[in-house]
Image: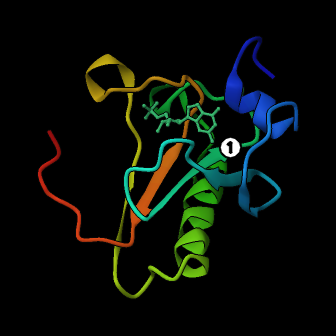
Amino acid sequence: MAEGCIFCRIVAGEIPAVRVAESERALAFRDLHPQAPVHVLVIPRRHVASLAEATDGEELGAVLLLAQEVARREGIAESGYRVVTNTGADGGQTVHHLHLHVLGGRALQWPPG
Ligand code: 5GP
Ligand code: ZN
């Protein structure tokens, strides 16, 4: 657990979050400020600051597979969805614990701003 990391605190249960799916290595919960009808964050349980710092392919695979499960559970697997991980300053990352945004439930614009 990284000192002061809000997502580590969510993993530890110290900060409440609406959990939608879990696996041994990953956790999925609703974004506090949803940008689409479905907006779920999927994170590794272990602290990894961003995709740039990731080294464990099995852990990354577990996070991606949980994102896929979230899409099924949320009923957007057929209609389609987007998985995004903002990385670093230009990527717009604000929480420095690796997370995938799973967005769906409406037609999403491309390219993003
Ligand atoms: P980023 O900008 O780093 O890609 O995304 C961080 C996301 O985390 C944002 O969409 C923001 O709404 C969400 N977020 C920030 N703090 C919390 C929190 O305490 N709980 C939850 N559920 N989401 C959070
Ligand atoms: Zn963390």
Q: Residue at x 38, y 35 (%)?
A: 86
Q: Residue at x 66, y 55 (%)?
A: 28
Q: Residue at x 77, y 11 (%)?
A: 3
* Left/right of residue 40 with respect to residue 1 in the rendered view: left
Q: Secondary structure at mark 1?
A: strand
Q: Quadrant for ligand 2?
A: top right
Q: Give the quadrant of residue 17.
A: top right
Picture coordinates of residue 76, whole percent (x, y): 44, 79
- In the image, what residue type sits under mark 1? Pro
Picture coordinates of residue 81, whole percent (x, y): 36, 69
Picture coordinates of residue 73, whole percent (x, y): 61, 79
Tell me the residue that label 1 is attached to: 44
The C terminus - image quarter: top left
Q: Residue at x 75, y 17 (%)?
A: 2
Q: How many marks?
A: 1
CB at mark 1 closer than 8 A to ligand 2?
no
The N terminus - image quarter: top right
Rendered view: 6 above or below 24: above
